[in-house]
Amino acid sequence: MSFVAWLKAHYDEKGPIRWLAFLLELIAAVMLMVLMLITCVDVVGRYVFNKPLPGSIELTEIGMAILIFAAMPVVTWRGGHIVVDLLDRYLSTFVVKCLSLLSAIVISGSFYYLGHRIYQLGERSIRRGEVTEFLGISSGYIVQYIAIMSWATALGMITYGVYRIFFQDKSN
């Protein structure tokens, strides 16, 4: 099976969104593997050689930020977040779609505002030259990455997320 055939079989998205979803999930998967390796090296170093990996906590924190915010746009536009649908069977399809649209607008607006504020904090951090305590990594760039991925989540939810609410068949 070719890679493109595998991609089409495992991703429901169409066109460039499929490739974007794959790329973001690849980043998250690679980061998860890196986090596993950091943890293994740290534990073996700590208990076998009595010398833990320097800065492993900082690397883990940065890795978790990269992992979570790489996966967040995909999870959000797929509607993979927790949803309580107690009233859906009692409401008409039109009302459920309207409530879903309202939810998408609120989610998008929230992520846009959070991204804007977080980006400002990242700029301030870079301007002040703030770095992590042990490894001296500039924390502002990680914060700006979080803001950019928050904007990507907002954009994905208001475009592809809304498309899925109205045009994708729920029987799949």
Image (cartoon, grey):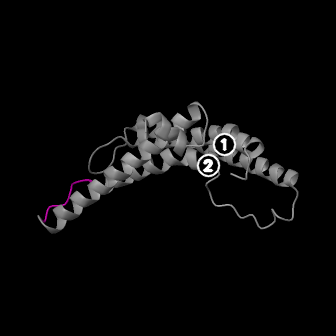
- Horizontal placement of 94 versus 101: left or right? right
Give the percent coordinates (x, y) of residue 19.
Answer: 52, 34
Residue 76 numbered mark, or none: 2
x 46%, y 43%: residue? 143
- Horizontal placement of 82 versus 147: left or right? right
What residue span does the magenta drawing correspond to? 50-56
User: Which three-letter amino acid code belongs to the residue tagged 2?
Assistant: Thr
x 74%, y 51%: residue? 103
Give the percent coordinates (x, y) of residue 120.
Answer: 54, 38
x 35%, y 40%: residue? 138
Give the vertical position of 121 relative to 44 (above or below).
above
| Residue highlighted by disc 1 | 157
Look at the image and tell me whether residue 77 can be seen: yes
Assess disc 1: are there few (<14), some (14-19) or many (≥20) residues with their C-alpha within 10 Å of its C-alpha: many
Which secondary structure is most common in the magenta stretch? loop
Secondary structure beneath label 1: helix
Q: Nearer the viewer, residue 116 or 82?
A: 82
Give the vertical position of 84 relative to 165 (above or below).
below
Residue 67 numbered mark, or none: none
